[in-house]
C-alpha cells in the first residue's frame, strides 16, 4: 500500500482526542508500561502511541491498543527499480508477519491493528500498489509475482509467466528475494525456532476456478494435490483460511471457526512460493489468508492465531 504516513492536522486532532480517551480508559499497565507518550511529532504534543500510521487507524479508538509502531524503511534494488521494504516495528515480543503483495491492503490494516494490541512486527513490501512487480533491466521490462521468487525454478517460471526472461533478470529477481528475506529475518527466525506468518488477501469468484480459497485444496480443487489435509468449516467463508506447513499448527488451529489447509511438504509443486521455501528450510510457516475487504475476519483470524499460539507456548 502507498498511503502517506504523515498525519494531517485534522487527523492529529482526532488522534489526540483518541489518545486522551485511551489514556483515561486504558488499563494502568498499558499507560504506564507500554504506551509511549510525551513526544513531539509534527508540532503536536501527543500523550501516547505516537508514531503509528494514522491513515490505517481502523482501531484508533480501540482501548486495548498497547503498543506504538515505528517504521524502518529499507530500499532494495530490483534491476533498475527500487522497492521499498517497510518494517513496522513495535519493539515488543510477538510474531513476525510478512505482506508481500502491494495491493493487499486489508491484510496490512488487519496486521497493524494486531501489532498494536499484541506486539511483534510486520514487514510490508511497497512497489506500485499492484500485485505483480515490474522492473527494467537493459532496456527490457520484466515482471513477476513476488510470491513466486523464493526458489530458482520458481523465479524463472514466474518471469516467463509474465513475459520476458533473461539470466540477468533471474539473478536480479533472486537477489531481491534474498534481500527481502534478510529484512524479514528469515534465518534468525529459523535459528531461534520461531515461525513466519504471511498475510494475504484474495478476490471473490463465482466459479471455483476463479477464486483462490480453502476450496482450492479440497476434492477436485485446483491445488488438491498440494494439500495433505484440509479442514473445512461451515460457519466462515472458505476465502478466509489458514494455510500451514506443520502438522502441529494444523492441529492447533483446526478446532476453531476457520478453514485450515496443511501443505503436503513432499508432494508440493516448486512454484517458488514462500511456503515451499520455508518448508524446505524447516521454518514453520502460517499464511493468514482472507478475502479483500474482510478486515474484521482477518483481525479475528490473527487474534485466534495469537491466542492459540500463546496457549500452546508456541511463540
Ligand atoms: Zn497475496
Image: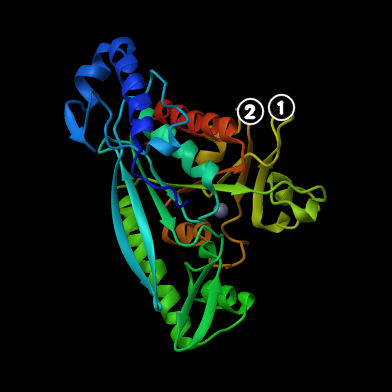
Residue that appears at 38% across and 18% down: 63
Q: Position of residue 282 (x, y in %)?
A: 42, 56
Quarter of the figure with residue 261 = top right
Secondary structure at numbered mark 1: loop
Residue 158 vs residue 217, the one in the foreground? 158
Secondary structure at numbered mark 2: loop
Q: Position of residue 234 (x, y in %)?
A: 74, 29
Is residue 99 visible in this depiction of the protein?
yes
Q: Is residue 189 above or below residue 307?
A: below
Q: Is residue 226 above or below residue 51?
A: below
Q: Position of residue 287 (x, y in %)?
A: 53, 46
Query: Label 1 vs label 2: CA separation?
Result: 6 Å
Along the horizontal axis of the image, is 127 left or right of 236?
left
How many callouts does the rendering have?
2
Q: On residue 257, which mark appears?
A: 2
- Residue contact at pointers 1 and 2, CB within 8 angstroms: yes
Reading the image, the residue beneath label 1 is 235
Amino acid at each position: 500500500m502507498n498511503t502517506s504516513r504523515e498525519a494531517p492536522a485534522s487527523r492529529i486532532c482526532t488522534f489526540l482526542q483518541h489518545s486522551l480517551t485511551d489514556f483515561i480508559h486504558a488499563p494502568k499497565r498499558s499507560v504506564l508500561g507500554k504506551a509511549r507518550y510525551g513526544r513531539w511529532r509534527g508540532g503536536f504534543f501527543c500523550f501516547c502511541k505516537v508514531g503509528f500510521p494514522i491513515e490505517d487507524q481502523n482501531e484508533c479508538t480501540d482501548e486495548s491498543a498497547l503498543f506504538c509502531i515505528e517504521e524502518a524503511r529499507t530500499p532494495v534494488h530490483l534491476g533498475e527499480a527500487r522497492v521499498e521494504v517497510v518494517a513496522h516495528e513495535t519493539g515488543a515480543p510477538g510474531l513476525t508477519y510478512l505482506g508481500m503483495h502491494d495491493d493487499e491492503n486489508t491484510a496490512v490494516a488487519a496486521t497493524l491493528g494486531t501489532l498494536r494490541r499484541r506486539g511483534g512486527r510486520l514487514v510490508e513490501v511497497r512497489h506500485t500498489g499492484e500485485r505483480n512487480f515490474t522492473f527494467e533491466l537493459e532496456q527490457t521490462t520484466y515482471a513477476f509475482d513476488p510470491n513466486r521468487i523464493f526458489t530458482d525454478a520458481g523465479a524463472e517460471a514466474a518471469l516467463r509467466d509474465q513475459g520476458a526472461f533473461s539470466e540477468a533478470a533471474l539473478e536480479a529477481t533472486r537477489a531481491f528475494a534474498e534481500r527481502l528475506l534478510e529484512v524479514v529475518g528469515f534465518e534468525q527466525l529459523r535459528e531461534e525456532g520461531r515461525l513466519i506468518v504471511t498475510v494475504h488477501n484474495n478476490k471473490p469468484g463465482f466459479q471455483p476456478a476463479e477464486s483462490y480459497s480453502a476450496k482450492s485444496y479440497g476434492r477436485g480443487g485446483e491445488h488438491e494435490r498440494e494439500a495433505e489435509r484440509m479442514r473445512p468449516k461451515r460457519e466462515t467463508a472458505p476465502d478466509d483460511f489458514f494455510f500451514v506447513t506443520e502438522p502441529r499448527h494444523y492441529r492447533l488451529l483446526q478446532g476453531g471457526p476457520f478453514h485450515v489447509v496443511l501443505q503436503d511438504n513432499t508432494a508440493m509443486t516448486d512454484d517458488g512460493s514462500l511456503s515451499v521455501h520455508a518448508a524446505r528450510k524447516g521454518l514453520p510457516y502460517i499464511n493468514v489468508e482472507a478475502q479483500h475487504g474482510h478486515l474484521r475476519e482477518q483481525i479475528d483470524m490473527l487474534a485466534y492465531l495469537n491466542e492459540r499460539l500463546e496457549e500452546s507456548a508456541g511463540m
